[in-house]
Image: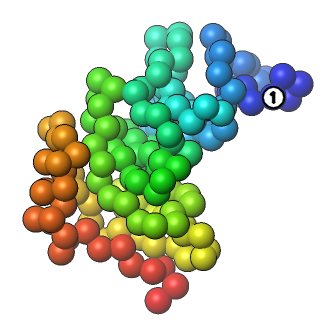
Amino acid sequence: MSDGYRVYQYKKGGWKKFPNQTKKALRLTIAPSGIPWIVTWDYKVFRFSYYKWSDMGLDGAKEVTAGPGNEVYALSKNSKIYKFMGENRWNLVDEKEGVQAISIGGNGRIYIRDDKNHTYMSDTLIYTTEYLTEEQMARKKAQCKAELKLTDTME
């Protein structure tokens, strides 16, 4: 594409540029609802909604992924995994050294790839609809530690 790093949508037999995109997209995911999310070159997460791109309040992201139930997760440059809780709030749900990529499968499980090219899959997820501070989330993670297991998919 001549103007690079733009988000396009195929409509009525042709590619149409999403309007009002002022930030270059480094990464892109599309939620099941059809809403695009991007990580920009300055490592911020944006979502397209109501004909504009909105900063979703997470700095330092390098990947974003969306899955069933329109749940959105992001991976930070320092290997932390965050879940979008709405209204520009993100909960830290896990961190694993060396994580390079994240994706959500159709089954709702999170898949990650590390710097040794190993792929891991979550057995279960920590689901919560409430906003938690990082300290509260750390306590919840400790309580759920047995539930959240990352399994090497090559085993």
| Figure check: 147 above or below 58 | below
Secondary structure category for the residue under label 1 = loop
Who's the residue at 29% across and 53% down the image? 93
Q: Position of residue 48 (x, y in %)?
A: 51, 21
Q: Quadrant of residue 147?
A: bottom left
Q: Position of residue 15 (x, y in %)?
A: 77, 24
Q: Position of residue 63 (x, y in %)?
A: 54, 46
Q: Quadrant of residue 12?
A: top right
Q: Nearer the viewer, residue 124 or 146?
A: 146
| Figure check: 51 above or below 30 | above
Can I make out residue 69 in this image? no
Is residue 32 found left or right of 133 in the rendered image?
right
Q: Nearer the viewer, residue 13 or 83?
A: 83
Q: Quadrant of residue 4?
A: top right
Is residue 21 found left or right of 109 in the rendered image?
right
Which residue type carries mark 1? Gly
**Residue ID for mark 1:** 4
Which residue is at the far bottom?
A: 155
Q: Position of residue 5 (x, y in %)?
A: 74, 30
Is residue 73 found left or right of 46 in the rendered image?
left
| Figure check: 32 above or below 22 | below
Which residue is at the far right?
A: 2
